[in-house]
Image (cartoon, rainbow, N blue to C red):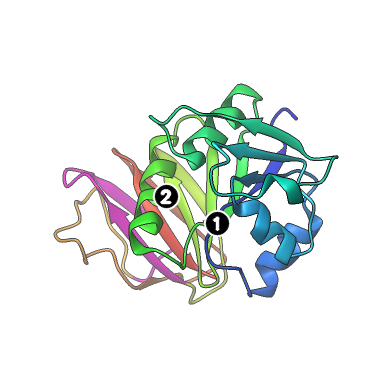
Amino acid sequence: MLNSLSVLIANGKKPTNKIIIDIIKDAKNIICVDNGYELASELKVTPSIIIGDLDSVNQDIIGEDVLVIEEEDQSTNDLEKAFNYCCKKKIKNIILVGATGKRDDQNFANILISLEYIDQLNIEILSDIYSIKFVNGEKTFDCNPMNEVSLISINKENLITTKGLKFNLENSKLSSATHGISNYTVGNKFSISCTFPLIVFKKL
């Protein structure tokens, strides 16, 4: 599975965006994060693996061909357990679905947890509205003209340079929490460089 793309399904809102549903249907490797198994069942896809402490999933409904990995360590949540498994198995490229839409506290925590793995995993969170990615250093993104893009930095000292956006930054800090919200692309690519990790929201 070295560097292969895996779809992780968490126990959030069921996606309705056709882009996301097609990605799930076409995925060769699906990992369910604990009760994300029920969401996978609703989407009529069979995961290869389910991982977590398994305290919220009915194990009686899990198919025999699904590898069940029970991790009881309460110092990490189920998403962290799944990310740690991916790191161990050298699964670097991850699309995470079902991580938004139900609980605001968990939505935010899922983004922050993903940010913590920025140097180990290439994670993209997909909601029905946004692609959420993470930059530490430099990254170039494919896009359509007039794609809405928002940048959020946890570190106020982050020096950010962008190219290909309507309102570009040049080695600048975000002056407030809303400074990087609601920008737009001007072409088919945009790039970002930053001195500290950055969260990038791109509208689907």
Seen as rendered, the residue at the extreme left is 175
How far apart in space, not on screen, are marks 2 and 1 (Cα)?
A: 11 Å
Q: Closer to the N terminus: mark 2 or mark 1?
A: 1
When the figure is inspected, residue 122 is found, relative to residue 72, above or below; the finding is: below
In the rendered image, the quadrant that contains the N terminus is top right
User: Which portion, as a residue range, is magenta?
Assistant: 148-166
Find disc 2 in the rendering and name its residue.
Answer: 110
| Image-based side of 109 in relation to 81, left or right | left
| Residue 178 within the segment the image draws in magenta | no
Residue type of the residue flagged with mark 2: Asn
Secondary structure found at label 1: loop
Q: How many marks?
A: 2
Q: Dividing the image into 4 quarters, which one contains the C terminus?
A: bottom right
Residue sitting at x 68%, y 69%: 19
Q: Quadrant of residue 159?
A: top left
| Residue drawn at point x = 74 percent, y = 60 percent | 41
- Secondary structure type for disc 2: helix
